[in-house]
Image: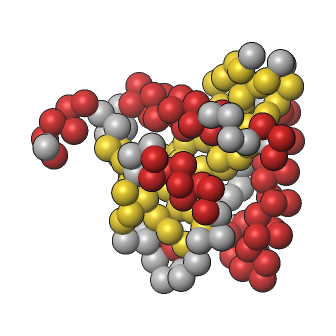
Amino acid sequence: MVRILRTNSDNISFRGLVALLDADLAQRDGDDHPFYAQYNKIDKIKHAVVAYVNEKPAGCGAIKEYEKDTAEVKRMFVCADHRRKGIARRILSELEQWAEELHYSCCILETGKKQPEAIALYQNSGYTLIPNYGQYANIDNSICMKKVITTRQKRRIV
């Protein structure tokens, strides 16, 4: 049974999962990891979710304000033994719903080219490629994506 908890970065399960995420990213990113790590601090995240499977932490994610109407998806991770079970999609969906409740009209995110499973998740969840933003603007390994999340915004675009 999967339970999704809305929390913040003080949550001990969230912090433990982020430590696992950072270890995974350090391997994948290699020499580029310190650059990315500086933008992934979690000390002031107000909107985080933790997925529990049988009451054990299995995955996490977070959102933070990027601009007035845009939330940035951060710190998405699912433990290896719980992957390919729909947990990441549930986490992402919960984050998008929470962002909409907070009156954001879209979500953006950055992921790395060395994370094909993350890229597939985001594309299959309706995210589209955008030019790399902010600190990722000239970073070749970064892929940035966006999704409109509000019904009001979706009607205007169509």
Estimate the x, y position of residue 54 in percent, counting from the top left. Answer: 83, 18
Does 106 sit left or right of 46 as displayed?
left
Estimate the x, y position of residue 24 in percent, counting from the top left. Answer: 81, 60
Name the quadrant of the C terminus.
Answer: top left
Residue pictured at 38% horizontal, 63% vertical: 129
Q: Which of the two residues, 100 or 91, is positioned nearer the viewer here?
A: 91
Residue pictured at 39% horizontal, 46% vertical: 126
Q: Is residue 83 visible?
A: yes
Does 32 sit left or right of 68 as displayed?
right
Residue pictured at 60% horizontal, 50% vertical: 74
Estimate the x, y position of residue 31 in percent, counting from the top left. Answer: 78, 82
Does 114 sit left or right of 146 as displayed?
right
Residue 64, above or below 113? above
Residue 116, above or below 96? below
Q: Residue furthest front?
A: 84
Query: Which color mode does the image show?
Result: secondary structure
Q: Which of the two residues, 144 or 42, is positioned nearer the viewer here?
A: 144
Residue pictured at 73% horizontal, 42% vertical: 83
Does 1 sit left or right of 152 as displayed?
right
Estimate the x, y position of residue 59 in percent, counting from the top left. Answer: 74, 37
Q: Is residue 46 visible?
A: no
